[in-house]
Amino acid sequence: MIFSGLIPVETRSPDETEMKPVFYVNLKQIILLNLIHTTGYYFSKIMEKVIFQKSMRKFVRR
């Protein structure tokens, strides 16, 4: 997940809006998104295993 380009950033005075690189502005957001993405990925993988094991147990019981 890499964001590139420029976005308008509001400075202290409302009249002037600077263009700053997205990377520096949204660094925390990018880190958060990456964390959420990776944890969600691993969580879904674990859940897949759990569901698969449960379904296998049901299958074995029959």
Image (tube, rainbow, N blue to C red):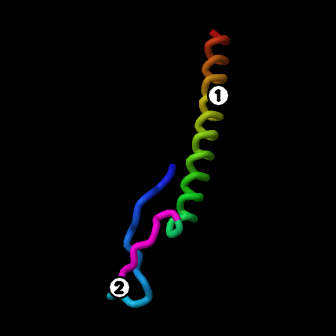
Query: What count of labels does the image hold?
Result: 2
Whether the magenta-drawn stretch holds residue 33 is answered as no
Quadrant where the image shows the C terminus: top right
Distance from label 2 to label 1 (Cα)?
A: 53 Å
Cβ atoms at labels 2 and 1 below 8 Å apart = no
Q: Nearer the viewer, mark 2 or mark 1?
A: 2
Q: Tell me which corner region of the image, top left, top right, bottom left or bottom right, holds residue 11.
A: bottom left
Residue at the left extreme? Answer: 15
Q: Position of residue 15 (x, y in %)?
A: 32, 88
> What's the magenta region?
16-23
Q: Residues within 10 Å of mark 2 (few under 14, many from 20)?
A: few
**Residue 49 - label:** 1
x 40%, y 65%: residue: 6
Q: Position of residue 54 (x, y in %)?
A: 64, 24
x 58%, y 40%: residue: 41
**Residue 16 - label:** 2
- Magenta span main SS: strand
Give the answer, above or below, for where 36 lies relative to 5.
above
x 51%, y 63%: residue: 23
Give, as a three-letter code, the residue at label 1: Lys
Q: Nearer the viewer, residue 39 or 15?
A: 15
